[in-house]
Amino acid sequence: KNAAVAILTPPPCDTERQNKRRDNENVTKLYAEACIKVASEMGVPVVDLWRGMQLPIAKNNEEEYSSSFESKQQWKIDYLSDGLHLTPMGNYRLYELVVEVLDQSA
């Protein structure tokens, strides 16, 4: 049997909606960076959910959409239900990123 192996980084979180005494956003960023490093060392692909959720999905290559998305950090609303767990749209973004990595690995 053939199996595809990839490392998945954690998603970013919205500390404002989470327990404000914890620095989840920076901790998950460090963990995501460690995942990328391990994937590189092991020679396996990485699904970078940390960065992939923060980047806008291209909408007809509209620059206005991109700058609006980043400035308002719309991903926090669209992709995170409670600041940590993925919404249906967040799960779909995860699916897109996994498919992208699998296509590149094939």
Image: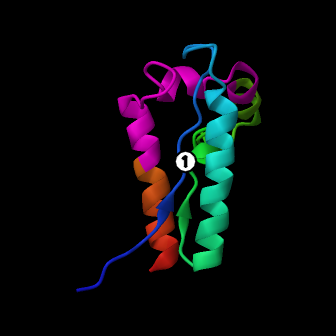
Q: Is residue 106 left or right of residue 3?
A: right
x and y percent of residue 74 in the render? 61, 23
- In the rendered image of this protein, does residue 30 appear above or below residue 100? above
x and y percent of residue 26 in the render? 70, 34
Element under disc 1: helix
The image quadrant where one finds the N terminus is bottom left
Amino acid carrying label 1: it is Leu
Q: Which residue is mark 1?
A: 49
Q: Magenta residues, as a range?
A: 69-94
* Camera-side residue of 93 and 48: 48
The image quadrant where one finds the C terminus is bottom left
Q: Is residue 86 left or right of residue 12?
A: left
Assess disc 1: are there few (<14), some (14-19) or many (≥20) residues with their C-alpha within 10 Å of its C-alpha.
Answer: many
**Residue 77 in sight:** yes
Q: Is residue 85 left or right of residue 83?
A: left
**Residue 60 in sight:** no
- In the rendered image of this protein, does residue 48 appear above or below residue 24? below
Q: Residue at x 54, y 17 (%)?
A: 18
Residue 55 belongs to magenta span: no
- In the rendered image of this protein, does residue 2 appear above or below residue 79? below
x and y percent of residue 97 in the render? 49, 54
Q: Residue at x 46, y 71 (%)?
A: 103
So how many labels did they put on this image? 1
x and y percent of residue 32 in the render? 62, 50
- In the rendered image of this protein, does residue 70 appear above or below residue 41? above
Secondary structure mostly seen in the magenta stretch: helix
Task: Give the quarter of the image for residue 58.
Answer: top right
